[in-house]
Image (spheres, rainbow, N blue to C red):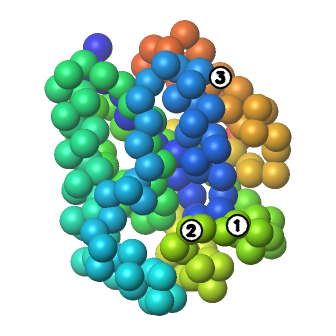
Amino acid sequence: MPATCLVVMGVSGAGKSTIAARLADELGWPMAEADEFHPEANIAKMSAGTPLTDADRMPWLEALRAWVDRRADAGESVVVTCSALKRTYRDVLRGSVSRVRFVHLRGSVDTVGGRLSGRSGHFMPPALLESQFADLEPLGEDEDGVALDVSADPDAITDAALDRLGLRSGGSAEPESDPNAPR
């Protein structure tokens, strides 16, 4: 059975780090923050309030995928945070040797914006949130993952992710096949 990479995705301020840490703890898998893979030039651009281009993002996504692949080659499943806003970005991650699955944390501009405005010590300014929502492409029906509302309690979000992805036992089981389950 191949290693699994669980990508906790969404716009800045959606709660990716919180939920990813809980999932990693629950599953006993190592975790990585995609922000740590950004080159300094990307951080400088974002800190200055300039949105990244697709060209800016490709080396960052490839570096994250390489980390996932190194872990998979060692037989380890992992949890990572990554905005993964566009399908093309998720395609880069899906190029991994791991089975890549997504937990899309979705919420309204008001909900996420309120969280982001109260956060300090992060290079992503709240002013860039609008550009992230503009770029966001929700998971397609053919993408392996679930979408969960960020307004729920973090424990409820974590439980829903584990249950809906069939990961309660820490494995990489197939998701439940309930055609009426919301994505």
Q: Is residue 116 above or below residue 134?
A: above
Q: Camera-side residue: 119 or 8?
A: 119
Q: CA distance from mark 3 to mark 1?
A: 30 Å
| Disc on the earlier residue, 3 or 1 | 1
Quarter of the figure that contains the N terminus: top left
Lateral position of residue 165 relative to residue 63, left or right: right
> Where is residue 105 shown, x and y percent of the image?
64, 51
The residue carrying mark 3 is 163
**Residue 80 at x, y = what percent?**
44, 43
**Residue drawn at the location 65% of the way across and 79% of the way down:** 126
Residue beneath label 2, please? 122
Residue at 59% in and 15% down: 168
Q: Earlier in the sequence, mark 2 or mark 3?
A: 2
Query: Mark 2 to mark 3: distance in Å?
Result: 31 Å
What residue would you read off at disc 1? 119
Residue kind at label 3, given as amino acid type: Asp
Mark 2 or 3: the one toward you? 2
At label 1, the amino acid type is Arg
